[in-house]
Image: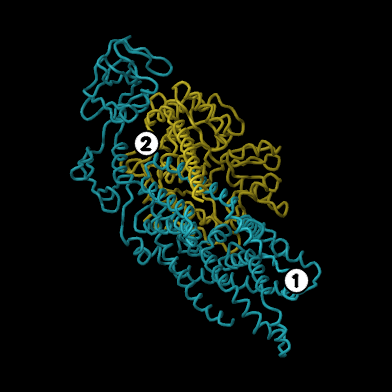
Amino acid sequence: MSASTASTTPTPTPVPRGALTPRLLSSFSGTVGVAIKIALLSLSNAVAVWAAYVLVDRRHWIAVAVLALATAAIDLLYFGRRTLPAKFLLPGTLFMVAFQIVPIVYTVEVAFTNYSIGHITTRAAAIKQIELTSLQPPANGRQYTMAPARDASGQLVLILQDDTTRANFVGTPKGLTPLPAGSVKTNALGIASASGYRIVKGAELFALDATLQTFAVPTSGDKAIRPQTIASAVEMTPTLRYDAKRGVFVRITDGAVFRDDGKGSFVHGKEELEPGWKTGVGFKNFSAILRDPLVRGPFVQIFIWTLVFATSVVLLSFATGLLLAITLDKAGMRFQRLYRSLILIPWAVPGFLSLLVWQGLLNDDFGVVNRLFHLNIPWLFDANWAKVSCIFVSFWLTVPYFFLVSMGALQSIPSELNEAARVDGGGPAQIFRRVTLPLVLVATSPLLIASFAFNFNNFNNIFLLTGGGPTQANQPIAGSTDILISYTYKLAIATGKGQDYGLASAVSIIIFFIVATISAVSFSRTKALENIN
Amino acid sequence: MRAKRTTALLAVIAFAVLAAFAAGTVRAASKATTVTIWADQDRKAAVTTLAQQWATARGVDVNVVVHDFGKIRDDLGTVAAADAPDVIMAAHDWTGQLAANGLVQPLVLSAAAKKQFPAYTLNAFSYGTAIKRLYGVPTQIENIGLVVNTALVKVPKTFAQLESEALTFKHKKAGNLAIAVQQGTNGDAYHMYPFFSGLGGYIFGTNKAGNLDASDIGVASTLLLKNAKLVDKWNKEGLINSKVDSSTAQNAFLKKQAAFWITGPWNSDTLKQSGLKFKIVQMPKIVKASVPFLGVQGFMVTKYANDHGVSALAQDFVTNFMSKAASQAALANVAGRWPANLVAGKSFSDPVLAQFGKASTGGVPMPNIPQMNNVWTDLGQAWVRSTKGAGATKASSSFKAAARSIADKIG
């Protein structure tokens, strides 16, 4: 299967194998092509119309505008005939915007906010929720079976029956008026009828949801009876009052003032009202990375380990993959296909499954590895051995990839070059070093960089194998095998009240710059390699 | 060519109009008053039956949507309002996070209903830094216990008996475990809690108002540190070992390689089908009672019920209907957990669950404040470090380090 077979075979017919694609392409300009085009465009427009319905229903006006523009652009482009390059560029651009640009913009936006537990809503919604939770049922407060009803003039009132005394009342925003005993009849569902009033039922009742929430029947002081469900009401007393003019909450019992602290909360001394809201905090998250010892402390150590991890996984797997590819490249080898299939197995099994299996195999006391080889190595429980395990398992998962890539690269090397080197008197080692390796590197170096960037952020492998552990004494968050991205994840879920997305986004932006810098430097280096050709 | 293009354009427009009609009908159909409930796969059928009963009486529609239980808490914060549930099934220890995020609505139970619940179940669903409110109606309770294989060992009355029985059994054959309690590399503070409470540790203290106080961390309490040497002893003699993970622990017990297993009611079917002779008890007192964490599950009303205009209906379902003894009994029958409602508990019988129930005496509800997020890993890791066999850290220093780390993170 070496490259020589293809180049020495004579090609008598003028139809090369690759001609299928142009033929397929040309058929698209015929009637069949037009039919396919119409079908695809109809489908895309139909999806757009359906999406517009949903978006309008949910009042996402910006999304509606973007959708309309994108659909118009698609229709104009593909009905027109002149803009051929754009026909290829547009889908790519749309997907790039949807899956690359939008998440990046969102991450950057979040990095400058306090988005975390207790700070996910808007200020207005937070104020509303605080007002709602500040209502307290007073000690021995009355509870009522309730039904909304209309009086003779059609005004909304509440028919109330005290749960303990069974006394009947009618409640209006003005106050509570007793009703004669026996005038209110109840059944299993609550109040069934009240003489002189029409009980509101069915759709009319369900439509009152928002009205009922603000409906209050004042009793004594600032107490009021408020509907809780569609069939019950409770006497409640507010504990906080919102002063809209000053934008502060005042506690009614002691007059304590809860002020907006500019960080998304109403606070009074150390006391804080929940929920808070999501708000911009400028560079606070970035300065926390630099200043907060909790975040900054392990950064350098984790960074070094991330580099070691990514580099050694890529180099070891590339070296092994290349070696295997060269070994199996020999023409006429028996069971060649079998060997190749065997090498590809780690790649064929879903990675997360292999990782969990390896976690079991490497268990120190009960794992197969230690039992089979009569070893007593703490594969996952010792900081250094856990690092070895991480590199080894990732290596095991990556080798098949580099085996495939190297095999392809080897086959693309013209055999004349090897022959010429041999004629010039080069030994196998020399040929490999001077001819094969540089040519393979030309083809694979972008892939090496990509693999490095991938392993630099290889969250799955670390998280599923060791979970970043074992933990280190004196280091609250980062474990011994945490790489930057798994550390970011831990930082996000386990600081403050938890789920600090703002801080995590800031860290991931920094990781992005690290990976981008390393990749840019590496790419400019590989330009030198390309000069060989 | 011109004509062709016009035909094409017409075809596209026709298709789009058709789609518009289709979308329109879908939209019209969803306009009836509907209460949406998120429930897990196991309880979907039971919740649907109950919800239908309620809905028919009230004349509304219900839509029970299956949602992975472990994801309900976090997904509630990110779901689009239009797809959001009005009612969720919830675990009590989510209360703090959900309330702090403003995602759930405070509820009021009637005085009569309140009397039917143990006080701790209602307290477990109550939260508030400045104002404490009830956010959930409890429906089911759960806790872990010490499962004893009575064919292999006697049920221990004291911790010393447990220790000697377990160690004798362990030394009988290579591969035997003394006490099968799950930890693994990532630790498991939940299953280790009976040991932790027995040694005199606690997670958070309470302040004058009776609320959990995140600044009072008892992970390295004086009493715990005084008794920490016991952990070093257990590690040395191999009574507990952090390398045992959940599947190792379960397999060892089922294959009679362990006579003691610490687990909860989620394994009651496994136990019933195992054919083993067993009894479930609370782990004997170490220096204080070795109580387990208590878990309460129940229903909450989300803030989205407001946006959907079904707040009063959703609250009616949760506070008036689900709190009833009959509803709770129906749910307990299928879900393999003891009902929270005391009246329902009296009419409910399940020999295994009843034994787990007895093992809960004096138990502590898992703290429901969001700061608990910071505790699990550190406390679990303290146990892992000190019970990993050879090379283990002294327990007093691991628990001190864990307490410091938790305090740092809570900040």
Chain B: what color? yellow
On the image, numbered disc 1 is attached to which residue?
Answer: A12
Q: Amino acid at mark 2?
A: Asp
Label 2 Cα crowd, 10 Å radius (few <14 / some 14-19 / many 20+): some
Q: CA distance from mark 1 to mark 2?
A: 74 Å
Dot 1 and dot 2 residues touching (CB under 8 Å): no
Task: Please determine whether, in this image, residue A22 is positioned above or below residue B132.
Answer: below
Quadrant that contains the C terminus of chain B: bottom left
Residue B379 at x, y percent in the picture: 49, 53
Q: Amino acid at mark 1?
A: Pro
Task: Please determine whether, in this image, residue A529 is positioned above or below residue A199.
Answer: below
Q: Nearer the viewer, residue A169 or B234?
A: A169
On the image, numbered disc 2 is attached to which residue?
Answer: B307
Q: Nearer the viewer, residue A407 or A37?
A: A37
Chain A: what color? cyan
Task: Please determine whether, in this image, residue A58 is positioned above or below residue A400.
Answer: above
Question: Can residue B240 be seen from the camera position used here?
Answer: yes
